[in-house]
């Protein structure tokens, strides 16, 4: 987006987990940070779970990551966009760990967590993209309701990762269902063998074991805490929404 508008000179996006920037021995941390900066030069360096650098007070390697990063940001003020991302409450601890952080990362964005409907859409996309699986007709709507009712408390902690986890669990359930010679689905092949059903997500009707029917409407998603990105404008939630299917 920033490249398309001529703000950044290169269409480069480099993502690193904050803990991956820490060296395993003395003298390794600074070169690791500098290498990440060099890879992203002219574009964006996105550091996810940045708050981990201040978790439990941090350590000497975490402090070196922060100091080296601040130096690199200062030396490349016009040629690099650096984004620190993480949960809002934990990010406050990180920003308070070094006085230079709030000065150099002064732009703050609050991004709402995904709604159950969005998570169901991401789950369908992940199932197709990573596992080459399809959703049965009406399953996305049923899954959104299931996420709201059964996994709503997990959205705060896992967010988009919850959708991927559900897709992977459903894949294992599908494999078990098709591999059981005593099951009614045994022997199914072709496209039907790669279609996820409500039962693969443990979706059942009230008081029955059969899959539930798709609801005619869904209620509003519950309010959930926000994630924070510090640095400069960032495409919400790490990228474009999954394509409609």
Image: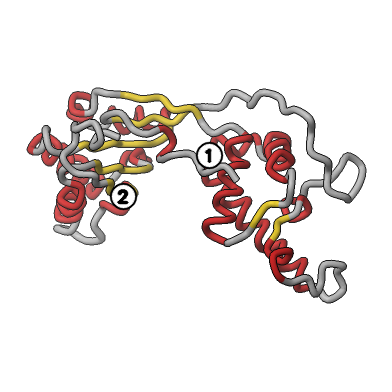
Residue 155 placement (x, y as % from top left)? 58, 37
- Given residues 148 and 191, the one toward you in this image is 191
Residue in front for this viewpoint, 67 or 108: 108
Taking the spot 32% from the left edge, 24% from the top edge, the residue there is 108
Q: Is residue 123 above or below residue 77?
A: below
Residue 77 position, x and y percent, is 11, 33
- The percent position of residue 3, horizontal first and vertical second, equals 23, 37
Residue 24 seen by the camera: yes
Q: Where is mark 1, residue-wise? A: 159
Which residue is farthest right?
207
The location of residue 222, given as percent across then percent down, is: 63, 25
Mark 2 or mark 1: whose residue is earlier in sequence? 2
68 and 207: which is toward the camera: 207
Q: Residue at x 12, y 41 (%)?
A: 72
- The crowding category of the residue bearing disc 1, from other C-alpha atoms within 10 Å (few below 14, some 14 to 19, many at least 20), is many
Inter-mark Cα distance, 2 to 1: 18 Å
Helix, strand or loop status at disc 1: loop
Horizontally, residue 24 falls left or right of residue 67, namely: right
**Left or right: 69 in relation to 188:** left
Q: Which mark is residue 16?
A: 2
Colouring scheme, one of rainbow, by chain, secondary structure, one colour = secondary structure
Q: Residue at x 72, y 66 (%)?
A: 193
Looking at the rendered structure, which numbered label has been put on residue 18?
none
In this view of the protein, which residue sits in the foreground, 82 or 158?
82
Instruction: Residue at 74%, 47% (x, y): give it.
Output: 137
| The N terminus - image quarter | top left
Residue 150 seen in the current view: no
- Total numbered labels: 2
Label 2 neighbour load within 10 Å: few <14, some 14-19, many 20+:
some
């Amino acid at each position: 987006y920033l490249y398309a508008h001529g703000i950044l000179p290169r269409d480069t996006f480099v993502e690193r987990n904050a803990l991956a920037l820490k060296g395993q021995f003395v003298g390794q941390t600074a070169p690791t940070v500098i290498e990440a900066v060099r890879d992203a030069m002219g574009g964006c360096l996105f550091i996810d779970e940045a708050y981990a650098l201040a978790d439990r007070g941090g350590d000497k390697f975490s402090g070196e990551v922060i100091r080296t990063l601040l130096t690199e940001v200062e030396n490349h003020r016009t040629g690099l966009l650096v984004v620190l991302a993480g949960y809002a409450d934990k990010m406050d601890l990180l920003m308070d760990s070094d006085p230079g952080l709030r000065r150099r990362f002064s732009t703050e964005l609050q991004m709402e967590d995904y709604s159950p409907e969005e998570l169901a859409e991401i789950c369908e996309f992940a199932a197709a993209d990573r596992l080459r699986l399809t959703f049965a007709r009406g399953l996305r709507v049923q899954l959104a309701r299931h996420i709201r009712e059964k996994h709503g408390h997990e959205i705060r902690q896992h967010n988009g990762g919850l959708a991927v986890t559900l897709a992977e669990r459903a894949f294992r359930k599908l494999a078990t269902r098709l591999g059981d010679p005593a099951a009614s689905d045994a022997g199914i092949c072709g496209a039907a063998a790669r279609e996820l059903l409500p039962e693969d997500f443990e979706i059942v009707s009230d008081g029955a074991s059969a899959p539930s029917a798709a609801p005619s409407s869904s209620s509003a998603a519950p309010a959930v805490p926000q994630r924070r990105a510090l640095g400069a404008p960032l495409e919400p939630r790490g990228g474009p929404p999954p394509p409609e299917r």
